[in-house]
């Protein structure tokens, strides 16, 4: 694995930013516009993972594997539920014309950047 300096405020790869949104995994904070969103860890990790790979489509299985790990014995609906909650929180705040969490029917999800 790679070593990260403990004294660094922002280890590389611990946050992603697009117009109107910042996802900081080291602090577990999501800021949309000027609003801090309360988000459980798994929702934040899912959003962070998608946003870290813009415009790339992931299947529910890939997302389960990456976010929940191999030991997860739930069903892929878990991903849908988390995506729905993330979307609701973001959409409560207002428009974000530069990006969206897009459902790719029959495949999965992607963080689409325009």
Image (cartoon, helix red, strand yellow):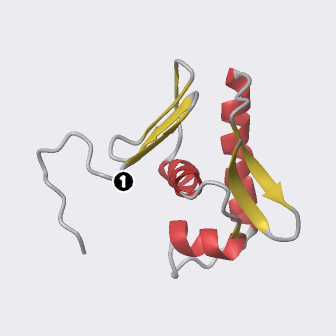
Residue 1 higher or lower than 90, as above or below: below
Question: In this figure, what is the number of numbered marks?
Answer: 1
Residue 56 higher or lower than 72, as above or below: above
Q: Nearer the viewer, residue 68 or 112?
A: 112
Residue 37 higher or lower than 25, as above or below: above
Residue at 73% from the left image edge and 60% from the top image edge: 109
Residue at 18% from the left image edge and 65% from the top image edge: 3
Residue 75 is situated, as x and y percent measured from the top left of the image, at: 72, 73
| Quadrant in the rendering for residue 58 | bottom right
From this viewpoint, which residue is outermost toward the right?
105
Residue at 70% from the left image edge and 57% from the top image edge: 110
Q: Quadrant of the N terminus?
A: bottom left
Residue at 70% from the left image edge and 29% from the top image edge: 96
Residue on which the image places disc 1:
13
| Quadrant in the rendering for residue 57 | bottom right
Answer with left or right where residue 25 lies relative to residue 44: left
| Quadrant in the rendering for residue 107 | bottom right
Answer with left or right where residue 29 lies relative to residue 66: left
Q: Secondary structure at mark 1?
A: loop
Residue 36 is situated, as x and y percent measured from the top left of the image, at: 50, 25
Task: Bin the neighbour count of mark 1 within 10 Å (Cα to Cα): few under 14, some 14-19, many 20 and up.
Answer: few
Q: Quadrant of the C terminus?
A: top right
Residue 97 is situated, as x and y percent measured from the top left of the image, at: 73, 30
């Amino acid at each position: 694995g790679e070593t990260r300096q403990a004294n660094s405020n922002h280890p590389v790869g611990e946050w992603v930013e697009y117009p109107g949104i910042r996802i900081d995994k080291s602090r577990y904070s999501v800021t949309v516009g000027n609003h801090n969103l309360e988000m459980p860890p798994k929702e934040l990790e899912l959003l962070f993972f998608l946003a870290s790979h813009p415009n790339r489509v992931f299947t529910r299985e890939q997302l389960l594997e990456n976010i929940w790990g191999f030991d997860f014995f739930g069903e892929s609906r878990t991903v849908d539920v988390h995506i729905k909650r993330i979307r609701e929180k973001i959409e409560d705040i207002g428009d974000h014309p530069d990006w969206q969490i897009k459902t790719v029917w029959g495949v999965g999800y992607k963080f689409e950047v325009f």
